[in-house]
Image (cartoon, rainbow, N blue to C red):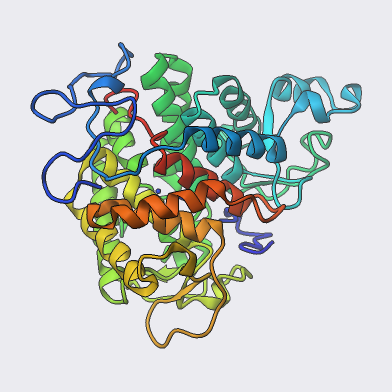
Amino acid sequence: MKRFLLPLMGLSVALFMACSSDDTAPVTPGSGTNEGGETTPGDNSGSSTTPDAANATYYAARPAPNTAAVEAMYANWISRFYVTAEEEITSPGDLGDLYMSKITGAARIKFDNPLNTVSEGIGYGMLITYFMNDMDKFDRLFKYYKAYPVSEASGMYFMRWNIKGDKFNGGFTLAANGGSATDADLDVVTALLMAYGKTGNAEYKDYALKVAASIYNTEVNSETHLLMPGNDGKHMNDGYCYNISYFSLVALRLLAKYDTERTAQWNEVKDATLAYMKKVQDAGYGLWPDWSDANGSPIDPGNNSSTGKLNNYFGLEGVRIPLRLIWDYDWYGDESTKALASKAAQYIYEKTGGDIKQVLSRYIYTGDQPSTGLGGAHFRGAFCAVWTVNPDYAASVAACNDVVVTTAFTTANYFEPTLQMLDALYLNGYFKKEFNY
């Protein structure tokens, strides 16, 4: 694998995310604000009501959407990476009734090795299909996630991070690596809670809260209140090794809203996350290293990953941070998130002169920038997205969105096209607040 090689630790291979002033920003297609510029209130903590998209407030300055290009990109992404059990299972009778009951009607996202499936891909897939309003595919991916829990008996409902096997034909016997991946679990919880708010389907909320308990009990460092990379993350620097690209602020806000038994605890995690991200960013040039320790210093996670050996860089891990930040700012207008996104956006804008085609494949956290190649579509999409924090960058955002949505997928591996897909969805107004999340 190009990002993670974790035979023992059970972590994910890799994640994921602006009104110029304090005024309400232009609103994305299909949305609007009320007279006061505020999101219309509504309590959906217990049950769903009418979706609230028409009254949603957004804070980012996104470009005019190119929905035709996004829809074409989605169709291409689905054809390359999404596959159902019915398409892949060749000998159902050989797999056993229990396995077939859990997997019939499911679908997966093919990993870089297309025989394998990672929880990260399921999380990305659930976000993508949700925002595309493709709920049949969403439900099939959700079923796959439920089929491979780390240990329901131990109260760990999140999916094993890496299912190694012959597509769907391996049954449970090839479900190696029992640990979880925190970024995937947060993305799945986010997708499920959004789906619950939109549809009122209690199954989404109920399972999300089971996963939420699993996350809090085993993926949060009880001393720092920061998210560890997986449920066995204490193996990594005694639980003090962090991957900031796993930190989903949107997920933490949704958990604080819906997981009412732990609202205060989730807010504590959110506050610790924002403080840590600021500390690490302020010590560098404007971005973050792929991995960092309790003090915020770059660290090799010791997991044999390629990114770990380049631990002073913002690279294949960090590329997911910009979308996570701008998504949170766009939906909630948080000034702390805005400050983080603005500093990162300014750094890259100055480095590239506002030309997204000049984005590099990695950036030094501190020190001299070595020579390196140009970044792929995932790097271009990430920084195009975060530039929406500042309406002064509007011309560059419009130009770079054209690049993001018209660039053909350049690799057979799933990671770059998947991040490109997510960035395109954000930039073109698909990250809609369908309900008062």
Asked if residue 348 lies left or right of residue 134, the reply is: left
The quarter of the picture where residue 314 lies is bottom left
Tell me which residue sits at (49%, 41%) in the image.
185
**Residue 15 visible in rendering:** no
Asked if residue 382 lies left or right of residue 32, the reply is: right
Q: Is residue 85 above or below residue 388?
A: above
Q: Quadrant of the N terminus?
A: bottom right
**Residue 347 visible in rendering:** yes
Residue 346 screen position, x and y as percent: 28, 66
Q: Is residue 270 above or below residue 286?
A: above
Residue 41 screen position, x and y as percent: 17, 22
Which residue of the protein is positioned furthest toward the left in this rendering? 36
Residue 15 screen position, x and y as percent: 50, 52
The quarter of the picture where residue 202 lies is top left
Residue 363 screen position, x and y as percent: 45, 74
Q: Is residue 379 above or below residue 132?
A: below
Tell me which residue sits at (70%, 23%) in the image.
102
Q: How many marks?
A: 0
* Residue in front for this viewpoint, 420 or 401: 401
Which residue of the protein is positioned furthest toward the bottom in this rendering? 368
Asked if residue 398 lies left or right of residue 37, the reply is: right
Tell me which residue sits at (26%, 34%) in the image.
27
Q: Is residue 331 above or below residue 30?
A: below
Q: Quadrant of the C terminus?
A: top left
